[in-house]
Amino acid sequence: SAAANGSHVLVYPIPRSGHVIPLLDLTHRLLTRGLTVTVLVTQNEVTLLQPLISTHSSCSLKPFVVPVPETPLSTPFSPIEAMKAMREHHEPALIQWFKSQATVTPPVVAIISDFMLEWTHDLAARVGVKRIVFSPSGACDRSFSFALWKDPPKKDDPNDNDDSSPTSFPKLPNSPIYPWWQLPPFHRNGKEGDPSWERWRNINLAERASWGFVFNSFAGLESRDLEHLKRELGHDRVWAVGPLLPDRHSNDAVFNRGGTSSLPHQHVMLWLDSREDNSVVYVSFGSRVTLTSAQIEVLTAALEQSRVQFIFCAREPREKNGREDSGAVSDGFEERVRDRGLVIRGWAPQLAILRHRAVGAFLTHCGWNSVLEGLAAGAVMLTWPMGADQYTNAKLVVEQAGAGVRVGEGTRTIPDPTELARLLVRSLEGSNGSERVRAREISRAAMEAVAQGGSSDKDLDELVNRLNEASK
Ligand code: UDP
C-alpha cells in the first residue's frame, strides 16, 4: 500500500506498562506517517498490539514475537535480572532477524529502543543501523541523570538513607535541590563494581553515543531541559513528540491501554457521567507501587473525611515478604462511601477516567505517563512521588508547571489525614485557583503541541524525514 513506502524501523520496548504503553503510542504515530514498523514483543504483549493492528489494517505493522521465556508485566521488577535475561534471549533472535531482513525492502534503518536497553546501541552499530533512544521519562529526568554522571554528589556517609540534607545541582537549568535520600539509591552508595551503578553508567554512555533521542514530552512543558540535553549531547537530534496519547475517539486504543479494566469500563464511565464537571478526584499510584496498610488507612480516612467524590484505584496487595507490607482497602470503607466513591481493585481505565469532564484532580505517584495524562487532561495534580524519576517529575509539576501541590514524598510518608482531606477538598474548589488555571493552560499547550504545526508535530515530522532520508 502507499502507506508502507516509508523506511522500516524496529521498535523495541521493555515489557513494563509504563514503558511499553508510550512506545506503542509512538509506533501508532510512525505508522500513521507511513513508516513500516516491526515491534519486538514477547507472547505476553501481543494483545497490546491489537488496537494498533485493527487501526492499521495495511501490513505496515509487523509483530516480531521473540521465542523466549516470559517475563510477565506483573512480576516484581528486578531491573538487573530482568534486563540480563532479556538480553540473553533477545540478542541472538535479533541478530537472526536482522540477517533475515538483509534483502527485504524497505530496508531497516533504525532501532528505536527503550533507554534501559543500552546494549542495543552496540547491536545497532554491528548490523549497520542507527539507534534511537526512547525515553519513557521526561527530559527533566534524563538531564538529571546526566548531571549525576558529570557531577556526582558526595557524602561522608553515603549509606545514611534518612539524610535529608540538601544536595544542589547548580548546573541544571532550574538549579534543583534534592534531599540526599531522594537521589537514586545506586548513587548514594554506588561505585565501580556495584551492578546497579554499572548498569546506570552503561545506560548513560549508550544514551550519549546513540544517534538520536525521542521524548514523550513537549517543548511547552520542558523546553529548558530539552535545550539543556541538546547542549549536553552536542547534537540536536532530540525530538519531543508528546504527549503521545491516543485520540479521544479511538475507543479501542483508549480502553485497551496496557490492561483490561477490573471493573467494566462502561460502568466506570456511567458513574462519571452522572457527576458534575471537575467534581471527582482520581487516586492512583500507577502499575507498580503498592501502599502500606498505614498509608491505605490514612488515605481512606482522608477520602472519607473530605467528603469529596473520588475514584480510588488500589493495586492488589503484594504478598508480605518480611521487608515490606502492602495494605488492602477494607470492605467497610466501600460501604461507607458508596454514594460518592468508587474503588477499583486492579487495573483502571486511567486515560479515559482522566479525560472525563467530571474528573478535576489527580492524586498521583507521578510516574511520567501519569503526569502527562493528568496534565494533558487539565487535572490539578496532588503529588506523592515514591521513587525513581518520580521526585523529579513531581518537582516539575509543582515548581515549574505550577499545576499541583505536594501531598507526600517517598514510600515512608504517612500524611496527616486532616491535612490531606483539606488538600483533596481544595483541589476541586473554585474554577480559578492558581493550580486550576495552570492545569488548563498546560492542557491547552499539550493539545497545541500535537496538533498540526505544533512543536511535537514538527519534531515527529523531522524524525520521520531523517529516517526516510536514511533509507535512500
Ligand atoms: N495505567 C492504567 N491503569 C492502571 C494503572 C496504570 O491505565 O490501573 C496506565 C497509566 O495510564 C499509564 C501507565 O499505565 O499510562 C503507568 O505508567 P506511569 O509512568 O504513570 O507509572 P508506572 O506504572 O510506570 O509506575
Image (spheres, grey):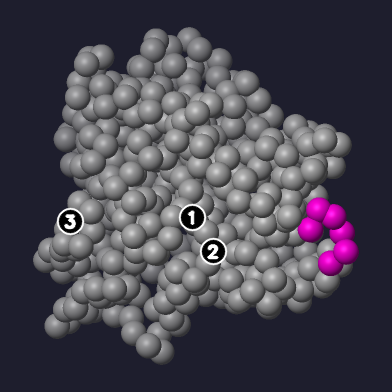
The image position of residue 304, as x and y in percent, is 30, 28
Q: Amino acid at mark 3?
A: Ser
Mark 3 and 2 residues: CB-CB less than 8 Å, in contact? Answer: no
Query: Can residue 69 be seen from the camera position used here?
Result: yes
> Which residue shows up at 72% across the image and 73% down it?
127
Q: Quadrant of the N terminus?
A: top right
Decide: is 252 above or below 364.
above
The earlier-in-sequence mark between 3 and 2 is 3
Q: Secondary structure at mark 1?
A: loop
Residue 180 quadrant:
bottom left
Foreground residue among 232 and 207: 232
In the picture as drawn, the residue positioned furthest to the left comes out as 165
Q: Residues within 10 Å of mark 1 (few under 14, many from 20)?
A: some
What distance separates the C-alpha of mark 1 from that of mark 2?
7 Å
Q: Residue at x 22, y 16 (%)?
A: 432
Taking the image as shown, residue 212 lies to the left or right of residue 337, namely right
- Toward the viewer: 285 or 45? 45
Amino acid type shown at disc 2: Trp
Real-space Cα distance between discs 1 and 3? 25 Å
Question: Can residue 46 be seen here?
Answer: no
- Residue range highlighted in magenta: 102-107
Q: Is label 1 in contact with label 2 (beta carbons under 8 Å)?
A: yes
- Residue hosting label 3: 175
Tag 2 residue: 211
Residue, disc 1: 237
Find numbered disc 2 in the image and state the secondary structure of the residue it sits on: loop
| Residue at 23%, 79% in the rendered image | 159
Magenta stretch, main secondary structure, is: loop
Q: Residue type at mark 1?
A: Arg
Depth order, front residue of 348/307: 348
